[in-house]
Each structure stands twice: as C-alpha cells, then as structure tokens.
Amino acid sequence: MLDIEYDISRKKILMRLKRIEGQVRGVQRMVEEQAGCKEILTQVAAIKSAMSQVGIMVFENHAQDCISRAMNEENKEDSFKEMVDLMAKLIK
C-alpha cells in the first residue's frame, strides 16, 4: 500500500474514533442526567455501528497489506489464515 493511501486511511479512522469518543461522552452525560432509556439506547446503537465501521476500515487496510505480502511469499496460506482469523474477530 502506498504511504499516502495509508495516511489518508489513518486520518479517516482517527476522525471517526474522535467522533465516537464524543458520542460516548454524550451517552455518559445522558446517563448522569438520567435521560430516557430510548434515547440512550439509540446512541449506544449508533456507537456500535460506528465502531463496526472503524473495524471494517482497519480490516480493509490490513487485508490489502496481507494480499500484497502474500503475493510475494511462498506460504500464502498463513496470510490467508491471518485474514480469516481477523475477520472472525471482527464479526463476533
């Protein structure tokens, strides 16, 4: 992967994580202020979805790296197994 592409992806991931951090703080405030369960759960669902998207972005970057590495290695099965193991962790 090109360094420029990695930097752009890293910046996008960091921006999303900062947004998620703000959402988590918002939920914390909502709990402290005894907001309604419906509003809190709506925000929790949004946070879970946002974290899933971050996981997908990180996995995509890693998968691209694994694929390019595997093309240059004799033991492609290890790289493939690594990708499958990481995907399994992501979808749990």
Image (cartoon, rainbow, N blue to C red):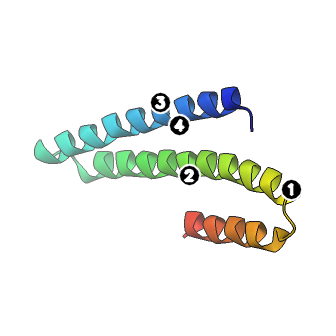
Going from N to C along the chain, the mark reached first, 3 or 1, is 3
* Distance Cα–Cα, label 1 vs label 4: 28 Å
Q: Which residue is mark 4?
A: 13
Q: Which mark is residue 15?
A: 3
Instruction: Report x, y in % for residue 79.
Output: 75, 66
Q: Quadrant of the N terminus?
A: top right
Real-space Cα distance between discs 4 and 3?
5 Å
Q: Nearer the viewer, mark 1 or mark 4?
A: 1
Instruction: Name the amino acid, label 2.
Output: Gly
Image location (x, y in percent) of residue 51: 48, 49
Q: CA distance from mark 4 to mark 2?
A: 9 Å
Residue 36, how many percent across, how many down?
22, 48
Q: Which residue is mark 2?
A: 55
The foreground one among 86 and 90 is 86
Asked which quadrant contains residue 71, the reply is: bottom right
Give the amino acid at mark 4.
Answer: Ile
What residue is rendered at 54% in x and 70% in y?
Answer: 92
Residue type indicated by callout 3: Met
First reached walking from the N terminus: tag 1 or tag 4: 4
Q: CA distance from mark 1 to mark 2?
A: 26 Å
